[in-house]
Image (cartoon, rainbow, N blue to C red):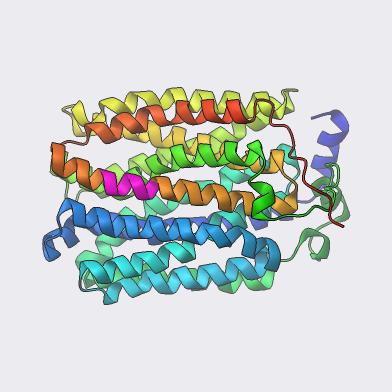
Amino acid sequence: MNASASSASGRAGHYRWVICALLFFATTINYVDRAVLGVLAPTLSAEFGWSEQQYGVISASFTLAYAIGFLVAGWFIDRVGTRVGYGVYLTVWSLAAAAHALARSVAGFSLARFVLGLGESGNFPAAVKTVAEWFPKRERAFATGVFNAGSNIGAIVAPLLVPWLALTWGWRTAFVVTGLAGLVWLAFWLPVYRRPAEHPKVSTAELELIHSDPPDPPVKVSWPRLLRFRQTWAFTAGKFLSDSVWWFYLFWFPMFMADRFGVDLRTIGLPMVTVFLLADVGSVGGGWFSSLLMKRGWSANGARKTAMLVCALCILPVVFAPHVEGQWVAVWLIGLAAAAHQGFSANLFTLTSDMFPRAAVASVVGIGGFAGAMGGFCMNLGAGWLRESTGSYAAMFMMAGGAYLAALLAIHVLAPRLAPAQLEPQA
């Protein structure tokens, strides 16, 4: 960043970070709601007699719906805007999360998870589009890392809050309380959010900073057009390979700890907090690292891919997690991998605004999110089958270790210079 840009940043206000804070809290709630089932999985499996395959089906119901939801989430949010779009999706997922309390069977839990997945699919397209609207390119990776850190805070809050709610008032209360928290967030979002140019609390200097990049030309945005670009497939490949691993950590970590080390509802809290606290550090750190490199004169291509390579290498040791004897050795290995995943993910999301105009960002995130959720669907079904067939988690952790290098290779082959996609101009 040159001296004049740095000076402008210093003079500008900071209201864009208030918006980023709202994105952070929405993402936190998003992950609390999806993580509740994972925390309660050993308890619910014992109460209802679920097999590993049945739990895999319930988990896969969420990821299948999440994938389907992404098919329309980006398109919908690009057309109605982030204020309305975020509100609609958050309302749906909050009510669906609370509705888990009504479930009595595998089919009932699968239905609740399916509707939850449809609702939660709107979070990241809306959040990434909001960042593209409110931040200049040089700040987007860091802002994305900040709001994406909410996913880890949510995964930390869940094992602290959910066992206490479940042990005190029963597991159904845990679903109701965490589910309805989203409606509280909505009471802040709707009055506060406006586009930067329309917001009374955004100063002229801050608005100039937000719009300091060259303006995007008006372009035609549609899935058939976007699917013609290698840049779209680069993001999609990265999401398919990396997100499948994150879904595995989120839904199977408590089951892995219970099976391998005898951890139960009363003792799962600290291991989960440790893993996702490390993931939080990785989310902010990964975005900060590539932004730092860009401030020092690196290209977006060099900065993003270098940060992603460092993260991918840090993930490799997770292959040893099912083979170690000490519980905390496994926790630290998985925690390091979770941190590196989130650093990788912060940069991966930012690639969309590096390669596409703001008007197309949510749609591209939706396409990639569909692919990532389908990867999670395959991983959840496969994990249940592999666990029952082999009696081990080794195969899943082997895939988890190598997925990110494969993802980075695919991204580099498809988008070697992160060149902007040349969309047709709007007539």
Q: Say which quadrant the N terminus sits in.
A: top right
- The x, y position of residue 391, in whole percent, is 13, 38
Observer-nearest of 284 and 62: 62
Residue positioned 29% across, 27% down in the render: 319
Is residue 114 covered in magenta?
Answer: no
Say above or below: 54 vs 399. Answer: below
The number of numbered badges drawn on the structure is 0
Magenta extent: 376-382
Q: Say which quadrant the C terminus sits in.
A: bottom right
Horizontal placement of 362 versus 314: left or right?
right
Q: Is residue 338 visible?
A: yes
- The x, y position of residue 415, in whole percent, is 64, 30
- The x, y position of residue 132, in whole percent, is 70, 49
Say above or below: 142 vs 302. Answer: below
Horizontal placement of 213 versus 127: left or right?
right
Residue positioned 47% across, 46% down in the render: 372
Residue lying at the far bottom in this picture: please name it.
102
Is residue 379 covered in magenta?
Answer: yes
Main SS category, magenta section: helix
